[in-house]
Image: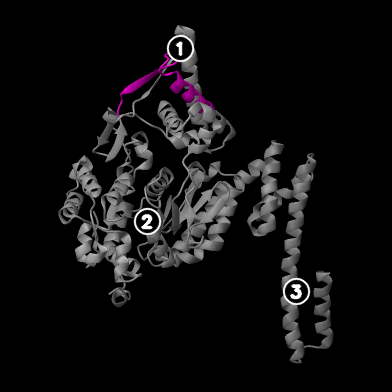
């Protein structure tokens, strides 16, 4: 089937139409107005982050002088304080605050850890260095006990400073990669993402050092699986169809999401995702789309609200005649996760997405991206993706 | 980003020159050279190629040279040394990229700071070497042509010997 159709010259009409629409839209510079009941988080440069840190420590010192009983207030990150902003399609943090007291026995360990992380952030910013969450944990194992404690303090510090975690120079180790029609700058080095072999460029967690220099791409494709990335890289997909391809190799990590946001914001190109046809794949798409609940305070810097779900959709399984033996039965957990997704407001508002998840629930089947290779290894690159991008078959 | 529209409906996006003001001083030059050497031919659209080439000239005129000059003519020796060190490295890799600073080398060779003088001298030597290499290539080409003419009996042995001597003298 793939061999028979591989010679067809796809024109990517639908994807191009979307690209032209974006080109026209880029004239209107739209500022995102966040709802008044949510907090404002800023992406800061090193100097701004240091200033905010000094303001915070000054306020603590003032409270010591004034009452001898200092406290720190920070936005609450509990689920009751997470708000879905329908207009901007983002998960955001509300204005509920929590207070941590220095003099209380119950919060003394928490406060000590917070101050230790604050000290580390100060050192990183002053020296212009970056550290991973793991390194922060090892900087004082005795105090943190477990990494989950240092991780929590790191997130607390970012919210206390009303900034993103990357602005504190504490980064998560990156696992994503990117390839295609793009040239970037990493400090003083120019990197050509077409010339790095099949593996592409490993997305740097130090994204404050990265700047987009040049691109002649017309769309961005996010793939869930490394296997799909390998297939696309081997076919040099971006040569025939000008695009940038990236993957987080599974769940969407912060660096990959942030880099995608950066690409989408600077280049203003249509973005498509290719994930497994199962609730986890759809959840990964949703995290790229509107952010995760845990990092809702960073959503404006991590989410790509215009990303389209290109596939693999449940309806594709019949449309592309995926053999029955390639379709997997849903487990109880898959059914539970699918129902949870169907209950999310952002899915309810998107009829096509809701219908596709309902269809999955009705048929009780799921499938991996790799199932497309049942029609030949080149089916993904020569038929499936070109056809979908030509006909506009996405959600 | 600065957008350049291709006839086939595609686009090329290049970073705005305003963003380069914060870059390390030598980087705009590297960027210009990179796009000229590695990318411009790939765009396959004469109009876009011309527009981009004009934009690169604009970057050179408005950002790259003024920034280099401000550092090289400034009073901050540390900054000048750091810029010259990067320019020296660049001049070893691709002398063409560092051409715009050549007119400023004479002043730097008279500087009071020894490190600055030494770096300026090294860069100047790299220019001299490059000039010599170019001259040698030119002479070699002429000599090869004369050799053909000589073998074809079009010129005398004396004329060929004179050209060869000129080439060998320069080579030594």
Provide the residue designation for mark 3. Answer: B139
Provide the residue designation for mark 2. Answer: A225
- Identify the residue at the far bottom of this view: B153
Instruction: Estimate the x, y position of residue A164 in percent, counting from the top left.
Output: 42, 34
Q: Are marks 2 and 1 in contact (CB under 8 Å)?
A: no
Asked whether A134 falls inside the magenta stretch, the response is no
Provide the residue designation for mark 1. Answer: A63
Left or right, B64 with reference to B3 = right
Does residue B104 lie above or below A368 as drawn? above
Q: Residues within 10 Å of mark 2 (few under 14, many from 20)?
A: many
> Dot 3: what SS?
helix
Residue under disc 2 on the same chain as residue under disc 1: yes
Instruction: Using the image, tell me which numbered label, if any, was put on residue A350.
Output: none
Kindly indicate the quadrant of the structure image that contains residue B67: top right
The foreground one among A224 and A349 is A224
Asked whether A96 falls inside the magenta stretch, the response is yes
Q: Residues within 10 Å of mark 1 (few under 14, many from 20)?
A: some
Left or right, A62 with reference to A16 = right
Kindly indicate the quadrant of the structure image that contains residue A375: bottom left
Kindly indicate the quadrant of the structure image that contains residue A296: top left
Q: Chain of mark 3?
A: B
């Amino acid at each position: 089937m793939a061999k028979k159709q591989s010679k067809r010259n796809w024109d990517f009409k639908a994807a191009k139409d979307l690209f032209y629409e974006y080109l026209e839209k880029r004239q209107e510079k739209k500022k995102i107005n966040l709802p008044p009941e949510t907090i404002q988080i800023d992406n800061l440069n090193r100097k701004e982050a240091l200033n905010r840190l000094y303001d915070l420590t000054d306020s603590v010192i003032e409270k010591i002088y004034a009452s001898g009983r200092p406290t720190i207030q920070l936005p609450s990150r509990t689920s009751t304080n997470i708000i879905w902003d329908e207009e901007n399609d983002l998960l955001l943090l509300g204005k509920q605050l929590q207070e941590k007291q220095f003099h209380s026995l119950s919060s003394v360990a928490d406060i000590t850890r917070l101050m230790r992380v604050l000290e580390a952030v100060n050192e990183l910013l002053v020296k212009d260095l970056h550290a991973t969450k793991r390194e922060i944990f090892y900087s004082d194992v005795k105090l943190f006990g477990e990494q989950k404690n240092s991780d929590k303090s790191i997130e607390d510090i970012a919210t206390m400073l009303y900034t993103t975690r990357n602005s504190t120079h504490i980064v998560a180790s990156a696992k994503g990669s990117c390839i295609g029609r793009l040239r970037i700058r990493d400090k003083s080095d120019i990197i050509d993402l077409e010339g790095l072999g099949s593996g592409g460029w490993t997305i740097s967690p130090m994204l404050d050092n990265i700047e987009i220099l040049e691109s002649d791409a017309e769309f961005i494709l996010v793939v869930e699986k490394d296997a799909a990335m390998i297939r696309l890289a081997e076919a040099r997909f971006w040569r025939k169809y000008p695009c940038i391809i990236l993957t987080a190799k599974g769940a969407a990590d912060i660096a990959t999401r942030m880099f995608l946001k950066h690409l989408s914001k600077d280049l203003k190109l249509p973005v498509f995702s290719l994930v497994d046809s199962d609730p986890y794949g759809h959840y990964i798409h949703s995290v790229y789309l509107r952010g995760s609940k845990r990092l809702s305070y960073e959503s404006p810097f991590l989410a790509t609200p215009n990303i389209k779900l290109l596939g693999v959709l449940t309806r594709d399984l019949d449309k592309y005649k995926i053999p029955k033996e390639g379709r997997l039965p849903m487990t109880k957990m898959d059914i539970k996760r699918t129902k949870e997704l169907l209950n999310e407001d952002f899915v309810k508002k998107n009829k096509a997405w809701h219908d596709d998840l309902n269809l999955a629930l009705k048929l009780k089947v799921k499938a991996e991206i790799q199932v497309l290779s049942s029609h030949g290894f080149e089916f993904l690159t020569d038929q499936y993706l070109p056809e979908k991008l030509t006909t506009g078959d996405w959600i | 980003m600065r957008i350049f529209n291709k006839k086939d409906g595609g686009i090329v996006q290049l970073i705005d020159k305003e963003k380069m003001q914060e870059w390390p001083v030598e980087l705009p030059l590297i960027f210009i050279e990179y796009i000229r050497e590695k990318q411009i031919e790939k765009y396959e659209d004469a109009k876009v190629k011309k527009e981009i080439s004009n934009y690169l000239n604009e970057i050179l005129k408005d950002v790259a040279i003024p920034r280099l000059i401000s550092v090289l003519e400034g009073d901050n020796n540390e900054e000048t040394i750091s810029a010259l060190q990067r320019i020296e490295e660049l001049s070893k890799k691709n002398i063409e990229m560092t051409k715009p600073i050549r007119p400023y080398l004479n002043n730097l060779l008279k500087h009071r700071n020894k490190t600055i003088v030494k770096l300026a001298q090294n860069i100047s030597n790299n220019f001299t070497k490059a000039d010599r290499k170019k001259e040698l290539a030119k002479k070699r080409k002429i000599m090869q042509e004369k050799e053909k003419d000589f073998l074809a009996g079009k010129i005398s042995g004396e004329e060929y010997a004179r050209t060869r001597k000129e080439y060998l003298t320069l080579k030594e």
